[in-house]
Image (cartoon, helix red, strand yellow):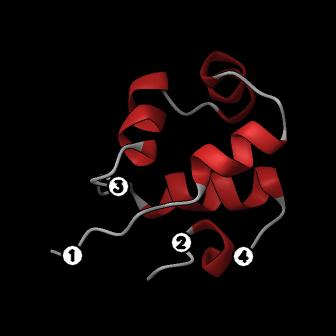
Amino acid sequence: MAKYKSNLKGLRSNAEMTLDQLADATGISKRTLITIECDEGGNPSIDTVKRLMEYFKITFEELYPDK
C-alpha cells in the first residue's frame, strides 16, 4: 500500500500547536500524529484523516498535497 507525505506538521506549526495540544483537540493519539508527520507518512485510518480535515477545516488535497 502506498504511503503519502502529509502536510500535518506544517498545518500544526502554522496553528502554533504542540503535538499534545493537537492530540487533545482532536482525540487522536500523540503517537499517531507523530507517525503521520514523519517522512513515511504512516497509514492513518479514514476516521483519523477526517478528524484532521474537520479540525483544520481543510480538504484532503491540502492535508496530502503530494498524493
Question: Disc 3 and disc 4: Cα gap in Å?
Answer: 17 Å
Q: Earlier in the sequence, mark 2 or mark 4?
A: 4
Residue 9 sits above or below residue 17 on the image: below
Question: Disc 4 and disc 1: Cα gap in Å?
Answer: 20 Å
Residue found 69% across the figure and 29% down from its top: 22
Question: Disc 2 and disc 4: Cα gap in Å?
Answer: 9 Å
Q: Earlier in the sequence, mark 3 or mark 2?
A: 3
Question: Disc 1 and disc 3: Cα gap in Å?
Answer: 10 Å
Residue at the disc numbered 3: 41
Q: Earlier in the sequence, mark 1 or mark 3?
A: 1
Residue at the disc numbered 2: 64
Residue contact between numbered discs 3 and 4, judged by CB atoms under 8 Å: no
Counting from the top left corner in percent of width and height, residue 34 is at: 42, 33
Residue 63 sits above or below residue 13 on the image: below
Quadrant assignment, res 32: top left
In the image shown, does 48 or 6 lie closer to the viewer? 6
Counting from the top left corner in percent of width and height, residue 11 is at: 72, 50
Quadrant where the image shows the N terminus = bottom left
Q: Which mark is residue 2?
A: 1
Residue at the disc numbered 4: 59
Residue found 49% across the figure and 24% down from its top: 30
In the image shown, does 35 or 49 lie closer to the viewer? 35
